Image: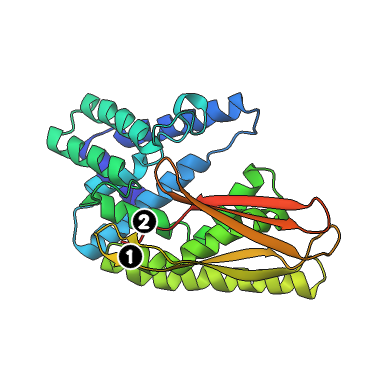
Amino acid sequence: MNDVRNLLETRFPGLHARIEKMLVEAEAAYNHLTNQAPSEFLLEHARRTAAIAHKISGMEGVDAFLPALVALYHDAGKFHEGEYHKDDVPEEEHAAVLAGRMLAEFGVERSDVEAVLEALRALYDDRLPCVGPCRIVQDADRLDKLGALGVGAFFTKATLRGRGLVDALVHTLSRELTYALAAPRSMFTETGRKLAGEQAAKTIAFFDDLLDDLESWGIASFERRTIILEEDFRTRDGASMQRMEVPIVMPRACPDCEASLGLTHLRERGVKCEKLTVRFACGGCSYARETSFCLPVFA
């Protein structure tokens, strides 16, 4: 973390502290409006992503200044005006507006400002080319969701949303495993691909052990099903892929009446991604759960 702070402080004193203050205030406003307990998840994630981007930059032989800036700003628009995804404008666009104003105020060169804004807008918009710092930050952001860091973030988010252990697994483990399995193919940089392979294996091993323990202790029983999407997918660099496998983790039977569960899914275009909505419902009672997440985009 100090490497990023020192890098920015050397070139633009006060900028790093100003960015962090903005992130803290944005999350505080959201927590206030939604009556949630104080938290600094946004700040911590930005710090981790910036640190990973700094490391990737060094391993790739790239100046870390622009990737570090993009990483610090990349979620700045998440709680626009104190709300989560208040409008149909992608959060990265809100982040770009905030970054543009602040960087200009600190006298950052116009060419660097434009590079930061282009990277922010393209980060998770698969219709835009992801080049330069965008590629490093995309890898860093995804690496933060893998391995021990990713597992920690998984349970932190579950706690912030008021979910218990089993409820969190039902609602979001399918997404985590989908991203872990796709991670090496989702990275732009050689460094990112190498690290993703190592960290994704840790993610999968941890949750495999957790599900096994839950079942062996008689607490909860899950099964894994696989949805095969046989369509024409395009990578960010324009290559074609004809197939995607999505692992779905769901209760082995209805937790209320022990009848079997049916599984259905719907794929549709969201604000900034291809979204998969999965629903499993009991044929014997009213039990049903639904989860949705952005499908991974391959580099």
In depth, the one of 50 and 225 nearer the eye is 225
Q: Is residue 126 left or right of residue 220?
A: left
**On the image, which quarter does residue 196 sit in?**
bottom left
Indicate the quadrant containing the C terminus: top left, top right, bottom left or bottom right.
Answer: bottom left
Secondary structure category for the residue under label 2: helix
Residue 140 badge: 2
Query: Which residue is painted at 35% across and 42% down in the image?
Result: 72
Labels 1 & 2 near each other (Cβ < 8 A): yes
Number of numbered discs present?
2
Along the line of sight, which residue is nearer the eye, 167 or 49?
Answer: 167
Residue 295 position by quadrant: bottom left
Q: Quote the CA–CA distance across marks 1 and 2.
A: 7 Å
Vertical placement of residue 192 versus 64, above or below: below
Residue 92 placement (x, y as % from top left):
36, 38
The residue at 29%/47% (across/down) is 127
**First in sequence: mark 1 or mark 2?**
2
Residue type marked 2: Ala
Q: What residue appears at the point 68 percent right and 70 percent down from the top-left corner?
A: 223
Residue 111 visible in this rendered orientation of the protein:
yes
Residue at mark 1: 192
Q: Residue at x 84, y 57 (%)?
A: 256
Q: Residues within 10 Å of mark 1 (few under 14, many from 20)?
A: many
Left or right position of 12 against 110: right
Q: Residues within 10 Å of mark 2 (few under 14, many from 20)?
A: many
Residue 39 x %, y %: 57, 37
Whether residue 14 is visible: no
